[in-house]
Image (cartoon, rainbow, N blue to C red):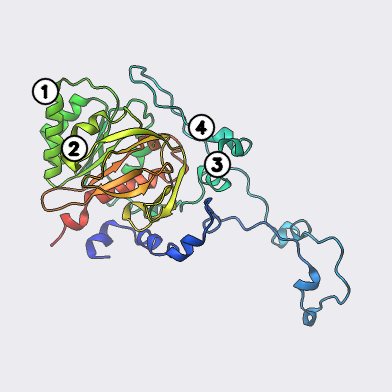
């Protein structure tokens, strides 16, 4: 890492990418996800044949072994190193409660907490996915986040949270961003969002747009919204644009055609966990991109949309249904970075389980683009 990266980035986050298994090792893993490499729990005990296990030189028995294999897990007292079965996680799963029915609620996800483990097979989840949704599989320590805690106190984030079905944002995403030092302003009102961009665009380093299916803006105001966002982008600052299943991409589709040359469409099944890989295979994200530093597994969202065409985008992840679901546009001297995510329900559902907190922090840190902004 260069000096600026060392100032803002965690070394452990880079190492977490560099130490991922090689492509050969990746291709050798089974189709269903395997958490064995990342679990802190020891493997289950194997029945031991004492005749085979104990060399004769160490006192092995010449007699035939017992007809019934011995289970050392049962025979070794706890104080001699036996491994108890880890108890199931009691961590609650975030529940979304719609408050304003003027916006049609998105489809409700499966209730993971109820499906673990009794309805696991009925729900179609692999054992590994259930473990991920319990919060296992990703390193918990914040030094595995891309950005260092407290390092971004000089940077500000504006959030247009227009979908009122995303509840708990301040306790989830807002809290995660604040831990890194970001000064966060968020609004659920489109006109207030316009006012913030009109009067203080230069005050914000990264802007989020979380769209919905309705608007309070008239056509003139919609055009002003689009113009302000595009001008902000051309000033070299970062944009984090979300979408979700049709029609929850209204505000995003005002700006995406001019921004990246495409629009969001579709309503495809999601509700699964993505794992690292090449980003082009269904159910995988790009193992080598910075936004996935410290992330082995990431919840994709409940039901999600996708870009109608590639446009100017480079795709970083493919949904379990085979569509691009996370894409980006790299910065140039003419504009800032853009990150497009097509499953904003990950901002609420399963927040404490499969990678969400680290993901939104990593993306926001990435969109600051410290490499370009502090280039000497």
- Say above or below: 105 vs 245: above
Disc 4 target residue = 110
Closest to the observer, 315 or 238: 315
Tell me what residue is drawn at x 52 percent, y 52 percent.
Answer: 31
First in residue order: circle 4 vs circle 2: 4
Element on which disc 2 rests: helix
Residue under numbered circle 2: 257
Above or below 372: residue 106: above
Label 2, residues with CA under 10 Å away: few <14, some 14-19, many ≥20: some
Horizontal and vertical percent for residue 104? 36, 21
Q: From mark 4 to mark 3, how far is it between C-alphas?
A: 11 Å
Q: Residue at x 11, y 23 (%)?
A: 220
Spatial separation of the CA atoms under disc 4 and disc 2: 33 Å
Residue labelled with disc 1: 220
Number of the front mark, 4 or 2: 2
159 or 70: nearer the viewer = 70
Q: Secondary structure at mark 3?
A: loop
Q: Is residue 284 above or below residue 110?
A: below
Residue at numbered disc 3: 125
Q: CA distance from mark 1 to mark 2?
A: 18 Å
């Amino acid at each position: 890492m260069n000096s600026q990266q060392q100032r803002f980035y965690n070394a452990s986050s880079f190492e977490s990418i560099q130490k991922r298994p090689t492509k050969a090792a990746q291709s050798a893993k089974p189709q269903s996800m395997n958490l064995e490499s990342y679990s802190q729990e020891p493997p289950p005990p194997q029945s031991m044949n004492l005749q085979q296990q104990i060399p004769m030189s160490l006192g092995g028995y010449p007699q035939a072994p017992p007809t019934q294999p011995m289970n050392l897990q049962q025979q070794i007292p706890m104080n001699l190193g036996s491994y108890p079965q880890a108890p199931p996680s009691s961590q609650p799963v975030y529940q979304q409660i719609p408050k304003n029915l003027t916006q049609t609620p998105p489809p409700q996800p499966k209730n993971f907490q109820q499906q673990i483990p009794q309805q696991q097979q009925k729900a179609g989840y692999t054992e590994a996915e259930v473990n991920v949704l319990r919060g296992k599989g990703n390193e918990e320590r914040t030094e595995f986040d891309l950005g260092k805690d407290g390092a971004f106190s000089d940077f500000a984030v504006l959030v247009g949270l227009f979908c009122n079905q995303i509840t708990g944002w301040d306790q989830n995403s807002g809290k995660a961003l604040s831990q890194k030092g970001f000064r966060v302003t968020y609004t659920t009102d489109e006109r207030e969002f316009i006012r913030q961009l009109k009067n203080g665009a230069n005050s914000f380093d990264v802007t989020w747009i979380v769209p919905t299916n309705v608007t309070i803006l008239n056509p003139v105001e919609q055009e002003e919204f689009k113009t302000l966002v595009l001008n902000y982008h051309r000033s070299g600052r970062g944009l984090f644009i979300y979408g979700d299943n049709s029609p929850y991409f209204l505000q995003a589709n005002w700006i995406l055609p001019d921004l990246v040359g495409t629009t969001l469409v579709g309503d495809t099944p999601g509700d699964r966990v993505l794992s690292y890989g090449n980003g082009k295979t269904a159910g995988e994200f790009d193992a080598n991109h910075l936004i996935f530093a410290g992330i082995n597994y990431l919840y994709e969202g409940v039901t999600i949309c996708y870009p109608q065409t590639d446009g100017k985008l480079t795709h970083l992840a493919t949904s379990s249904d085979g569509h691009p679901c996370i894409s980006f546009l790299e910065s140039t001297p003419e504009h800032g970075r853009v990150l497009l995510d097509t499953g904003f329900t990950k901002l609420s559902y399963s927040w404490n389980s499969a990678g969400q907190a680290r993901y939104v922090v990593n993306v926001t840190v990435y969109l600051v683009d410290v490499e370009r902004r502090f280039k000497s």
